Amino acid sequence: MARLTCDQVAALVFQMRTLRTELPDAEAKDGRNGLPQRIYESLSALANRRGGGAIIFGLEDGSFRPLGGLDLARLQESLTSLVDQRMSYPVRLEFVACEVEGQRVLAVGIPECPQAHKPIYYRGKGIIGGSYLRVGNSNHVLCESEVRAILRSSDRDDTDSAPVEEARLEDFSPGLVANYRSGLSARRPDSSLVGL
């Protein structure tokens, strides 16, 4: 999402109030008591969304009425710290404080995470269970197959999948190969590699 202007923030608030719902690219949070407990879901979902999105703090839940009463510095510090320390990739948030209907709100622009680092996830839950995607007006936890599909589609340098041309049979440890085959057989009995 491009850097937000106060006019765009006011338009997003107006749109949420008119539609009585959050938007696919924008969420509303109260924020008067600091960060919501599971704000990482919103950060992950919007950063994994094509184009990113925004979170607007200082809005009443349900009515989207501007509330004011925000500690702008504390919210910015807390969000920056959370992204830097607890998320899998440090997307750089864009902050803009605005007056909407006479009340101060804080809009946080969340850029789309680069494809090579998707899915961005909350480290406290791990990649499976801590990766989210924005679907309509809600955050959807990605299941294992969705995470794997994203990982396959990224341009990661996965050197483990490339053959080692110089490898010889003597380079392999018979014990490690047997352990690998046993584990593979238990997890994926239909795999074509089990019978090799």
Image (cartoon, rainbow, N blue to C red):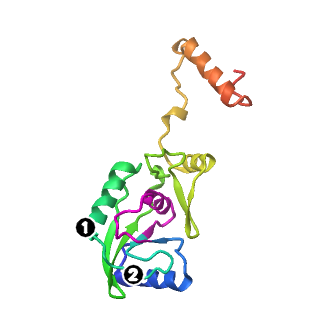
| Left or right position of 10 against 160 | left
The quadrant of the image that shows the C terminus is: top right
- Give the residue drawn at x 52%, y 20%: 167
The quadrant in which residue 71 appears is bottom left
Q: Residues within 10 Å of mark 2 (few under 14, many from 20)?
A: many
Q: Which residue is mark 1?
A: 73
Q: Dot 2: what SS?
A: loop
Q: Which residues are magenta?
A: 29-54
The percent coordinates of residue 54 (x first, y second) are 43, 70
Task: Say if the magenta span includes residue 40.
Answer: yes
The percent coordinates of residue 103 (x first, y second) are 33, 83
The amino acid type of the residue labelled 1 equals: Ala
The percent coordinates of residue 164 (x first, y second) are 52, 26
**Which one is in front, 28 or 145?**
28
- Give the residue drawn at x 53%, y 74%: 23
The extreme front residue here reads 33
**Which one is in front, 123 or 20?**
20
Q: Which residue is mark 2?
A: 66
Report if residue 1 is visible in the image: no
